[in-house]
Amino acid sequence: MNVRQAPEFPEWPQYDADEREGLIRALEQGQWWRMGGSEVDSFEEEFADHHGAAHALAVTNGTHALELALQCMGVGPGTEVIVPAFTFISSSQAVQRLGAVAVPADVDRHTYCIDVASAAAAVTPRTRAIMPVHMAGFMADMDALDKLSADTGVPVLQDAAHAHGARWRGKRVGELGSVATFSFQNGKLMTAGEGGAVLFPDTEMYEAAFLRHSCGRPRADRRYLHEVAGSNLRLNEFSAAVLRAQLRRLEEQTVTRQQRWALLSGLLDSIDGVVAQRCDPRTDFPSHYMAMFRVPGIGEERRNELVDRLVAAGLPAFAGFRAIYRTDAFWEMCAPDATLDEIAGRCPVTEAISEDCVWLHHRVLLAGEPVIRRTAEIIADTLAAVTAAPAGTAANAAPPATAVTAAATDV
């Protein structure tokens, strides 16, 4: 067999002298935590400004950002939060960790974002929040969600872990009037290894969140007068210094990803049996956290074989998320009063996508056009090999290119 060299993609994370200077700056200021230093404060101001928000609060990670936002919105025992059934498990676990019930709603077959009609059907008197996830940086239907919120009185919490810098009809995430959370985990569009942030539209909620993220202790307290129940979710100065540098190159990288996705999505759609994720045109500045596509009807086993072979061919490929209700973790605590089959019956699109979706890490979209074209060729050739082979045998066949292991990633 003629083995061809695997394509070379840009490394991730990326860094340069700006990160180095920031780390030295944080080191030499002599205070390494947010209550004595200036890096976290500066990052929060810059991140809020970039997203058009009144306030940003930096925290330890994206899951904690969700937990903190939900707690400030009154989520706790006896309440419910509507979440997409197709998402990373943190979206539901953040709800359940607060003692509330995460209620799965189906997603749109084109954007993979929450289906607003399914969310509306799930609203009850116990619902305290509706949590859309801007999947892969393609934003959920914020117009319809805002109307649903106005009609029901249930606020929206944007899980924007994939949507750094994204815009909906010209409005940045922080300009949409609802609370939004972000992640800075190692694979994200900007990263310090771990980290998160919450955007708040008003000062009152921001101040309440600040208390809770700092063990319930006011900024100037010297007598341990903890006013509310909280936890230590404070981001450190070194992470903030790195994130300030990451933020400065976000816009340029996003434009590059947009250009490369325009090419790659067309190439994917030209492959027999492949359908690229669709972006609602009202998302006029998508951030492209992932390059996602479906192979409808392939089934979970062959989809997994496809992913294994793509990884062997040098692509940073991953299987799509498992439906949250099809994980043991979802049922461990605060499970809905419904069976798995009942929930699955309400989520037919999620059932299908969970079995046929594949995604590529966003560093693919930072590569040059020849690499993008080679990527599409590998996907086409590999899919043809997988579908031609008897089920369960394709993964054992010789890979079509030099074997490269894709690093695991949390999303």
Image (cartoon, helix red, strand yellow):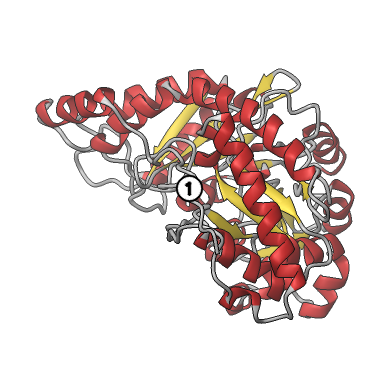
At 71% across and 18% down in the image, what residue appears?
170
**Is 334 situated above or below 84?**
below
Q: Tell me the residue that label 1 is attached to.
A: 62
Give residue 31's quadrant in the image.
top left
Give residue 403's quadrant in the image.
bottom left
Give residue 19's quadrant in the image.
top left
- Would residue 369 appear left or right of 141 to someone viewing this image? left
The crowding category of the residue bearing disc 1, from other C-alpha atoms within 10 Å (few below 14, some 14 to 19, many at least 20), is many
Horizontal and vertical percent position of residue 68: 49, 48
At 74% across and 80% down in the image, what residue appears?
390
- Would residue 239 appear left or right of 104 to someone viewing this image? left
At 47% across and 29% down in the image, what residue appears?
56
User: Of 111 and 104, which appears nearest the observer?
Assistant: 111
User: Of 103 and 391, which appears nearest the observer?
Assistant: 391
Give the number of callouts: 1
At 67% across and 24% down in the image, what residue appears?
285
| Kind of residue at badge 1 | Gly
User: Of 71 and 39, which appears nearest the observer?
Assistant: 39
**Is residue 27 visible in the rendered structure shown here?**
yes
**Is residue 80 visible in the rendered structure shown here?**
no
- Would residue 223 appear left or right of 151 to someone viewing this image? left
User: Of 356 and 201, which appears nearest the observer?
Assistant: 356
Horizontal and vertical percent position of residue 345: 87, 72
Horizontal and vertical percent position of residue 50: 51, 20
Furthest residue to the front?
A: 1
For the residue labelled by badge 1, is the local secondary structure a helix, a strand or a loop?
helix
